[in-house]
Image (cartoon, rainbow, N blue to C red):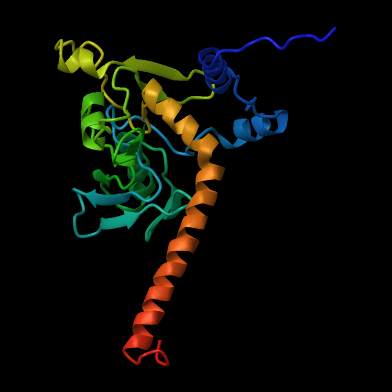
Amino acid sequence: MRRSTPFVSPALGLVALLVAAFGLPGCNTAPSKRAIQYMNQEGFGRPVFGNAEEEEYVSIGDSVTVFDVAHPDEIDVQLVVAADGTVLLREVGRIYIAGLTRTDLQSLLTRKYDPYFQDSPEIVVEISASQRVFWVLGEVAREGSFPFKGNQNIIDAVVDARPKPTSANLGRILLIRADPNDPLRLPFNFHDLVIQGDSSLNYVLQENDIVWVPPTLMAEFGFFLQKMLFPVTAVLQSLGNGLWGGRRGNVRNNGNRAFGFGGLF
């Protein structure tokens, strides 16, 4: 007896396709034991980090000015922190200063310079940061890193990045503070702030924060269809370019021959 094939409606097939596209678990990206050992030894993320809103700290590439109030003619230099986190001072040699706060660095240099003077030096340090950033990623026109200036909040980041009006899901923005041991994902609804005036979740940014603006469900489905149809559209585009390119070439050659330029082009 012949077994009949069950009928599957197009709507049910579309639902199954959506479930397969968005419901599949992601690949396992857990680091190996060797990677964990390496990260524990070398550090996670940037090797030099701190909180500039609590107190400015020295990072690689920063410009550091060292001035001695007690001996202004003796010590007044401006240095750039090298890639290895060090600076070279004429009197005390090369020292490692990356990661130190302004207060810590002033204390260190005071101790280093003290043996060279009869009266104690009064070291003042100024730090000009070169690379304090945060990131805005996702459905925005200006995707990438932005300078961290302090006293910036999440709405500043979203507005400056210019969300795409047709695909940005402003109701499901995430503020991500990546950390290997205690990652933090803070939801933010742009509409609650703009429409209702609720600023309770207008988070103040920290350097190295990531603001993620996800696509809407319709936009995500459109991206999925685009990926599924890419091989077909690529072939059709190639065929179209070849066909219309050949026709334009024939028209150009025929025109050149008509005007006597066939041997030149």
* Residue at screen point 37% across, 61% down: 90
* Vertical arrangement, residue 121 with respect to residue 54, above or below: below
On the image, the x and y values in percent for residue 211 come to 35, 28
Q: Which quadrant: the N terminus?
A: top right
Which quarter of the figure has residue 166?
A: top left
| 252 or 225: nearer the viewer | 252
* Residue at screen point 65% across, 29% down: 31
Is residue 65 shown left or right of residue 135?
left
* Residue at screen point 35% across, 55% down: 80
* Vertical arrangement, residue 135 with respect to residue 175, above or below: below
* Residue at screen point 60% across, 19% down: 25
On the image, the x and y values in percent for residue 248 come to 39, 70
How many numbered circles does the render carry?
0
The outermost residue toward the right is 1
Is residue 214 shown left or right of residue 162?
right
The outermost residue toward the front is 1
Which quarter of the figure has residue 3?
A: top right
On the image, the x and y values in percent for residue 265 come to 40, 86
Residue 214 appears in the picture as rendered: no
On the image, the x and y values in percent for residue 34 come to 71, 33
Residue 156 appears in the picture as rendered: yes
| 101 or 71: nearer the viewer | 101
Which quarter of the figure has residue 93?
A: bottom left
